[in-house]
Amino acid sequence: MKKSLRFIFFSFTICLVLLAILSWTSYQKISDSTSYATAVENTHEVLRKSEELVSILKDFETGQRGYLLTEEKSFLEPYYKAERQIEQVYRDLKYKVRKNPQQTKRLDTLRHSISMKIQLLRYNIKQVQMHEVLNNEVFLKGKVEMDRIRQLVNRFQAVERQLLEERRDVKTKNDTQTTTVLSLLSIFSFVLLIVSFVLIFLELQRRISFQHQLENKIDELNRSNADLEQFAYVSSHDLQEPLRKIRAFSDRLVRRHADSLNEDGKENLEKITSSAERMQNLINDLLDFSRLVNRKQTSSQEVDLQEVMNRVTNDLSVKIEEKKAELIIEKLPYIWGISFQLNQLFLNLISNALKFTKPDVKPLIKINHSIVKGDEIKGIEKVRREYDYHKITISDNGIGFEQEYAEKIFVIFQRLHGRNYYEGTGVGLAICRRIMSNHNGFIFAESQLGEGATFILYFPTK
């Protein structure tokens, strides 16, 4: 499942990167196409303005000739109007070719020639206004200047036409590339959509299959729980009845025939009684464990762990006095849980601390509480690391154990010490782990041989 999700994520990442590259390329191509279109339009405008400039000059010269021939001032109106228009057209052309230094230089030269032409025209008009004879040399200079203006305009326009052809070619090429890129983008987007659909469809199929498998596992677990309940029923009735009879008959033999039994017979009866009692304790522990697995009849509520600890210490008061143990207990919180299970949890842990003590050493048991983040807990699921947890530590100064057995001690029937040294069935810590699991919590053990043990409990705060 994880490999499949990684493959889908990797595929989507590659596709998105390629799609982003194509999209950016398309954007650049469209932007370039817009720029080229603007450049082509600008060239057309420059050509049109340069033609307009020549046309205005012609109107300028025509008005001047009409006045020279008729001395009618009405012919000077287009003359004055054309003079203002020339200045405006020149400024427009200067702005449009500002990024082309050669054309700007040609335009400045053209401006100078136009100024010279205007001065000659003004001179002729002034001569007529003063009723003086016109100077033929001035007319010749005017013609030469006009020819020069036409040459400059033609050269200016030739360069713009060349630029126009180049820009058209570039625009056409870019438009073709843009079409190609957009086509690729469309095809790739369609392929990505199809691939995404197929991957999601396959993932859904796998998840549905996994869900069916999970449902089957749940059914198997329910059947297993039912078998466990049946086992618990058999343990509580069918197995315990023979044990009670064995103990009863062995007690009766001891009472009635103790005098007639030799030492070997008495020893055998004691072994029978001891074995039956140990079997009885083992069955009771198994019953407790099976009840923890079957949680259908349990309900959670807000539980004051301080009260739970008070009940536990009260139940163990005799043993605490016998061991002369000292308990240092911090203020414990309220948690959401099952009261009798929490009572059993702390009862087992405190009992172990009182059981596995060093000879001639006064037992010291410390219970501390704090709030921690989930990411401080090693080995928990990633989704649960975002939550806060109550951390409760129960530490003692007993015999401890080697850290390599920190997990083994929570396995049912696993014992680190023989029953000849310490009583018990090896079920207590398995019950503690089951209780923590029922409360969506965790339990860990830390220890060093001969230096005591610490049990760490994590309960979710919500």
Image (tube, rainbow, N blue to C red):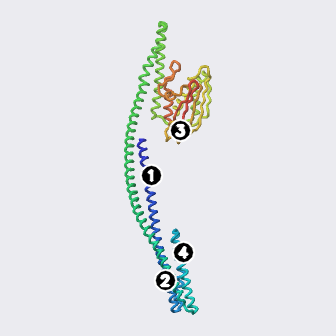
Q: What's the residue type where badge 2 is placed?
A: Lys
Residue receiving disc 2: 58
Q: Secondary structure at mark 2?
A: helix
Q: Residue at x 47, y 12 (%)?
A: 269
Task: Return the x and y of residue 178 as percentages of the image width and height.
Answer: 41, 61
- Per the image, the residue denoted by label 1 is 17
Q: Which residue type does callout 4 highlight? A: Asp
Residue under numbered circle 3: 460
Indicate left or right for 306 with 204 as reference.
Answer: right
**Would you name the residue on which mark 4 appears?**
108
Label 1 sits on a secondary structure element that is helix
Residue at the image point whose x is 44% and y is 19% from the top: 243
Element type at marker 3? Answer: strand
Could you tell me if the residues under marks 2 and 3 are in contact, i.e. CB atoms within 8 Å?
no
Q: Using the image, determine if residue 260 lies above or below residue 230.
A: above
Q: Is residue 144 above or below residue 43?
A: below
Q: Is residue 19 above or below residue 439?
A: below
Q: CA distance from mark 2 to mark 3?
A: 95 Å
Cα–Cα gap, marks 3 and 4: 84 Å
Comes first in the chain, label 3 or label 4: 4
* Most foreground residue, 76 or 162: 162
Q: Which residue type does callout 1 highlight?
A: Val
Q: Nearer the viewer, residue 163 or 113?
A: 113
Residue 54 lies, in percent from the top left, at: 48, 80
Label 4 to label 1: alpha-carbon separation: 51 Å
